[in-house]
Image: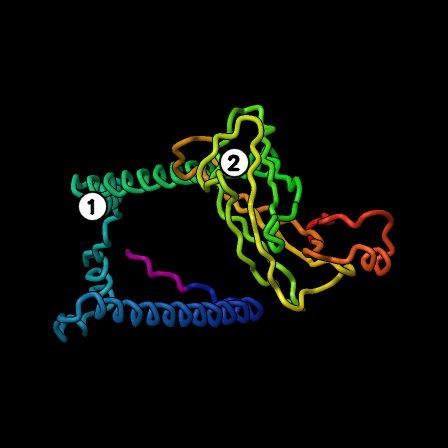
Amino acid sequence: MSKRPTKPAKPSGAAAAATERDKDSLIADLRRQLAAAQSETRLLKRRLEAARPAASTASAAAEPHQLLDALRSAAPRKTAAPIAPAAVAMKLGRRLGFWRSPVVIGVAAVLLAAFAADAGVGWYQARALREARQARLQLENTAMRSLYVELKQIAYEPDGKSFRLTLSLQNVSPAGPLYVMLNAVGVYVQAGTNWLQVPSRPAEGVTWGVVKLVDSYSYDVVFTPEVANWAELIPGYMHVRIQSDLLVSPRAQPGNDVVERRTPFYVYLKPHGANDADIKARARMQGQPPIFIPMPPH
């Protein structure tokens, strides 16, 4: 004889209230899970549509689990492979290949050689110019310090209007002889504020030319100071300037080693027929008035 199943006993009041609360909590939790699943389904649909834009409408309307399986089975997008360092080095080497060309190297070598030659020529020219300038300064120093020029005397000429002056050259250089070219001596007389040149010529037996000066040498010049209204800075005396222009070289056949030596002399000159007593009285001189009174350059 079969037995009938027994019915479960009904829960009491407190147990029934707890069971209702559990049901409500379970229902709320299921609803949250359903909302999350629906949200995930919509997200998967969008991803699938983006991954397979040409998919059919039927695939788009498939069930959520089918869409999930399709999305999982879809091949991922291929990403670009990273560039290897060797490839980068090879590309850089290709850019530098132009500078490895024999033509470029040859042109660069020619340019460098041209610049080096230009620098060498410039250095040589600068050195030669410096040496020439130094030699020039030494020659000028020799002409000014080793050659002594002196106005020895001035005397009356018998013609009653001319004068004879004597110039003396002396070589005091220990280096050896000097070769001096004698040029015409200029004689000037002051008239007012101007200097007037008067005729001058070498004395008899004297010629302008090159003199080998070992020790000393003297020569005479004759001049005629016929000037009206000459300046009288000292009573009874003319103011006269005598200018000696010489060319000096250490060699008999000079090249560029020639320097000019200009020496001016200033004197007060007593004219022919001057009244010595009048000059003594006016200038307050003692003794016989000299023919000339030398003055320092001015």
Q: According to the image, label 1 marks what residue? A: 98
Coloring scheme of the render? rainbow
Residue 261: x, y in percent?
A: 54, 43
> Which residue shows up at 56% across the image and 58% down it?
198
The type of residue carrying mark 1 is Phe
Counting from the top left corner in percent of width and height, residue 129 is at 43, 40
CA separation, marks 2 and 1?
A: 59 Å
What span is in magenta? 1-7
Q: Position of residue 254 (x, y in %)?
A: 40, 35
Give the residue drawn at x 39%, y 67%.
33
Is residue 90 in sight in this rendering? no
Which of the pair 227/15 is nearer the observer?
227
Secondary element under disc 1, as helix, strand or loop, is: helix
In this figure, which residue is indicated by the disc labeled 2? 139
User: Which picture quadrant has residue 252?
Assistant: top left
Q: Nearer the viewer, mark 2 or mark 1?
A: 2
**Which residue: 48% across, 45% down?**
183
